Image (cartoon, coloured by chain):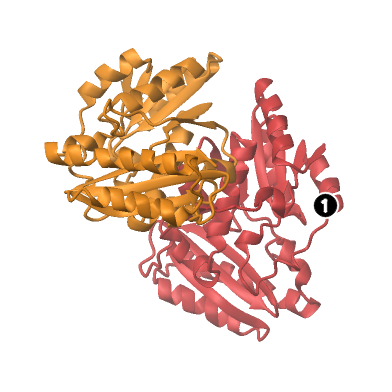
Chain colours: A red, B orange
Amino acid sequence: MQIIKTVAEMKDFVHKIKAAGKSLALVPTMGYLHQGHLTLMREAKAACNTVVTSIFVNPLQFGVGEDYEEYPRDLTRDAQLAEPAGVDAIFAPAVAEMYPKGYHTFVDVEEITNHLCGRSRAGHFRGVTTVVNKLFNIVQPDKAFFGQKDAQQVLVIKRMVADLNMNLEIVTVPIVREEDGLAMSSRNVYLTPEERRAALMLNRSLQQAKAAIEAGERRGSAIRDMIVQTIETEKLANIDYVEVVAMSSLEPQEKLEGEILIALAVRFGKTRLIDNIMLTV
Amino acid sequence: MQIIKTVAEMKDFVHKIKAAGKSLALVPTMGYLHQGHLTLMREAKAACNTVVTSIFVNPLQFGVGEDYEEYPRDLTRDAQLAEPAGVDAIFAPAVAEMYPKGYHTFVDVEEITNHLCGRSRAGHFRGVTTVVNKLFNIVQPDKAFFGQKDAQQVLVIKRMVADLNMNLEIVTVPIVREEDGLAMSSRNVYLTPEERRAALMLNRSLQQAKAAIEAGERRGSAIRDMIVQTIETEKLANIDYVEVVAMSSLEPQEKLEGEILIALAVRFGKTRLIDNIMLTV
């Protein structure tokens, strides 16, 4: 497995793969890999000859007061995990390699970025779409793999790819959870033991909502209120948002039908966690 | 020569060209072709095996009150001109093919779009970079050819390609002029005979400025004032801007040195014309 630091070397690597007629998958990450990432890599390897994973903590997608500086980084550990998951090359550029002096180009997806995380994290998705657009141009993958945990991110990236006529397929992989149900996240390492325990309420509230819908509840507001009440029994939890929305538009739904996304973001101390569940009603 | 109307068919055409190992050039236009466009096409054909020209009057780059509706269109005539210039395929999509319902993605280049035409045409360059980004993804050319007449457009597109790590080379071709010096433009057909005559002052003022710099003038403001005064002798002329700027940043230069761009936009009746000259001092 190679570790590549520059755009030029990455493009050389890609050029050779393509000249050999091999298919190429990209798994974009911010590193500090967990089983969720490794699942993406294994799926990518099953689908394509060659797998590149990018490890880049993208400053552009962090807002003022967010955890850009503290975000956990460990390239040595990441490399040890990625290789057995089937990764052929890690692309780990420096910030100045991705955003050199004089950098001034940004990609924006409007509308669906105004909901959910886009509302509480100004500029976040502009950072995501810009860096992902660059990574797609650098690596030129046939397929790129994203986790369903970042449900809105997946929709935004699919919108960008369709709108800009980009030449690749976006593959979404289900959320991977710890045994106790907590969605895997690089940010879980921030949690104190008490916060870690309190955070179990997220998945529990989503499962409760799912059961209520399966039992016939069709009012979006009732589902939302139920989740809010469940999470608020946990005094360490501070809700950022809980939303019951249409999967396609991310607009809140009062009468539940079709593909529904229930998404939430909740703070435990300084740590903001997200989780979600998709349902077809 | 093929005329292709859909993105899917265009991508099929490109796929076959690439599978045959041929090189591909793109000449993006808004149609109503003149010798300036045909020069781009001939240069493209000299550089690459296959030439695609796009003909698309892009609504996104026209502002409110601009000439989107009136912009001249004649695909039959364009096809007759393009084929002998070496074009292998015309890509002429409908607006709904490029911007289908639910379209929400935009590409922005900041800073250099705040000067010159960017100041008087709000949103213009966002429209240009968005459509050109799409065309590059659809046609995937090795090289794309642009005319120097739209000097700022060329800089903005080069910035986008560099910043987003796009995989092509931008080739710039010098301004093509009528025998009397008027820069060729599809908009020249709007001019009345009197306006057409008055518009000669544009190139004349640029040539005068060039002569003054060659004679030793190094003050940007003096050059600018000289051009303004020359154009204002023509009462049909309404100046939008005259600027003496650094080629790289488009920032006004008082002490002229290095690569200089003198650019202007002037209205004659309803018609807004642009022209420019590049100089190395």
Identity of the residue drawn at 61% across and 81% down: A238
**Which residue lies at the image location 59% right of the left edge and 37% below the top edge?**
A143
For badge 1, the amino acid type reads: Leu
- What residue is rendered at 18% in x and 51% in y? B235
Q: Is residue A123 left or right of residue B88?
A: right
The residue tagged 1 is: A75
Please provide percent x and percent y for residue B147: 41, 33
Q: Is residue B239 left or right of residue B257?
A: left
Q: Residue B231: horizontal and vertical position, in percent?
A: 27, 48
| Closer to the camera in the image, A17 or B197 | B197
> Can residue B78 be seen at all in this image of the molecule?
yes
Q: Horizontally, is A78 left or right of B254 in the view?
A: right
Residue A224 drawn above or below residue A86:
below
| Residue B170, position as x, y percentages in the image | 51, 33
Q: Secondary structure at mark 1?
A: helix
**Rendered image quadrant of residue B190:** top left
- Protein chain holding label 1: A
